[in-house]
Amino acid sequence: MKRLVYLLLFLVVFVLAISVVLKNPNDVDVFYYFNFKWTGPLSVLMFSVLAIGALLGTLLTASWVWRAKRERAAATREMRRMEQEISNLRALPAKE
């Protein structure tokens, strides 16, 4: 069911993207620093900006994910060490 929802969402976004491309065939001029000028279709510009934003978001989020994985691994090692220590203490004879 989840896969069907994703497929339908993808199809809706794809149809909207195609409609934007077909409705905006004109070229746009983009001016940037150092006299940089780019002329091309609006759809290419929109896709490029979206791709750059997704890439930057992924890169910024990746550091948090890596840190969380390292902390989880350290906590798992500590938990195993403590469980081993508890089992060793339980194996010791009790003093009365």
Image: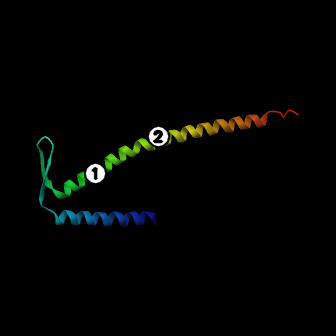
Q: Is residue 19 left or right of residue 54?
A: left
Q: Quadrant of the C terminus?
A: top right
Q: Is residue 81 above or below residue 44?
A: above
Question: What kind of element bears circle 1?
Answer: helix
What percent of the width, then of the height, locates residue 35? 11, 43
Dot 1 corresponds to which residue? 51
Count of all numbered marks drawn on residues in the image: 2
Q: How is the image coloured?
A: rainbow
Tell me which amino acid carries mark 1. Ala
Which label was assigned to residue 75?
none
Q: Quadrant of residue 95?
A: top right
Q: Nearer the viewer, residue 1 or 36?
A: 36
Q: Is residue 21 above or below residue 57?
A: below
Tell me which amino acid carries mark 2. Arg
Dot 2 corresponds to which residue? 67
Disc 2 or 1, which lies upstream in sequence? 1
Q: Quadrant of residue 45?
A: bottom left
Mark 1 is surrounded, within 10 Å at the Cα level, by few (under 14), some (14 to 19) or many (20 or more) other residues, namely few
Q: Are marks 2 and 1 in contact (CB under 8 Å)?
A: no
Q: Is residue 4 above or below residue 79?
A: below
What percent of the width, then of the height, locates residue 11? 32, 65
What percent of the width, then of the height, locates residue 12? 31, 67
Question: What kind of element bears circle 2?
Answer: helix
What percent of the width, then of the height, locates residue 82? 66, 37
Q: Nearer the viewer, residue 5 or 34?
A: 34
